[in-house]
Amino acid sequence: MTGTTGRTSYRDPMANSVRHVAEASSAHANDRFSDVDDARAAVEVCWGLLAALHRHAWALSGGSRRLEGFGASGNPYPWDRAAVRFIDSLEVAARHPPSWDEPPAGSAAHGWRHATRSLLLANDLLATHRDPRGVEPRTPEAAKLDDPRFRATGFVDLADIAVTVLTSQRDLALRGGQSGVSWREVPRRLPDLEPTWLAARDLAREAAFGAVGPRTGR
C-alpha cells in the first residue's frame, strides 16, 4: 500500500523491520552480552518480535474469517496455505507472557525491539483499511488486502524476518550462557522453535513465487 505525501506507507515500516532484524542478528553473532540481565532481556525481546510476527501474519492473511476460508477451500494459494502453517507454528510465541522492559543501553536487542515496533506500526496501517471485524472496507486501498500477490509480497518480508531471527537462536543461546545465564536455564528460555523455522522457510519459498508469479496461478 502506497503512502501519500506526509504519510507513512506500509512498505516503510516493513523495510525498517527487515533492516533492524538483520543488524541486530549480526550484532548477536559477533558481540557478547554485557551481563545476565542483558541476555535475559534479549530473549524476552526476541519473544516479543516473534509474537508480533504472529499478529502481523494473522492480519495480513485477513484474520479469522479469511483463515477459515483457506481451510475450507480445496485449492488455496500455496503461499496462503504456507502462511496458515506459519501462523500455527507461532502460537507458542503469541501465548508467551509479554515483557516490554527496555534492554540495557547499548544492547543489540534494541534492534529487535525497533523491528517489533515497526511490525506493529505496519499492522496498524493494515487495520486502518477495514472495520474492526476486518470485513467492511474503509478506504479504496482495502481491496489490496484481497489481492493474493499483495499478501504474498508481505509474506516474503515476514518469512525473511522470521528466518533471520530463528537462525540467530543458536547465537542467542551461546551468548546467554557466556554472559552467566545457567546452561540449564538457556533451553527453558529458548524452547525448540525448529517447526517455526521450517514453516518460515516454506513460506519464504511459496511467497517468493506468489509475489512475482501470475495473479491467478495456483
Image (tube, helix red, strand yellow):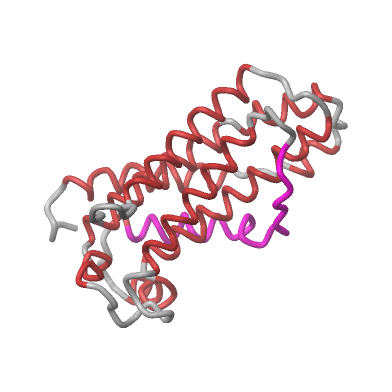
Q: Which residue lies furthest to the top in this view?
A: 30
Q: How many marks?
A: 0
Name the residue located 25 percent from the left edge and 57 percent from the top edge. 1
The answer to whether residue 25 is above or below residue 87 is above
Query: What residue is rendered at 54% in x and 32% in y?
Result: 167
- In the image: residue 50, left or right of residue 148: right
Q: Position of residue 214 (x, y in %)?
A: 12, 52
140 on left or right of 199: left
- Residue 85, placed above or below residue 22: below
Quadrant in the rendering for residue 33: top right
- At a point 33% along the width and 60% down the height, the residue shown is 80
Judging depth in this view, the residue of 70 and 125 nearest the camera is: 125
Q: Does the magenta stretch include residue 81?
A: yes
Q: Position of residue 36 (x, y in %)?
A: 83, 31
What range of the chain is rendered magenta? Answer: 80-103
Whether residue 201 is in magenta: the answer is no
Residue at the spot 63% in from the left edge and 33% down from the top edge: 169
**Quadrant in the picture for residue 125:** bottom left
Q: In which quarter of the image is residue 93?
A: bottom right
Percent across and percent down for residue 215 are 13, 57
**The residue positioned farthest toward the front in the image shown:** 6
The quadrant of the picture occupied by the C terminus is bottom left
Which one is nearer the viewer's eye here, 46 or 118?
A: 118
* Residue 157, position as x, y percentages in the image: 37, 44
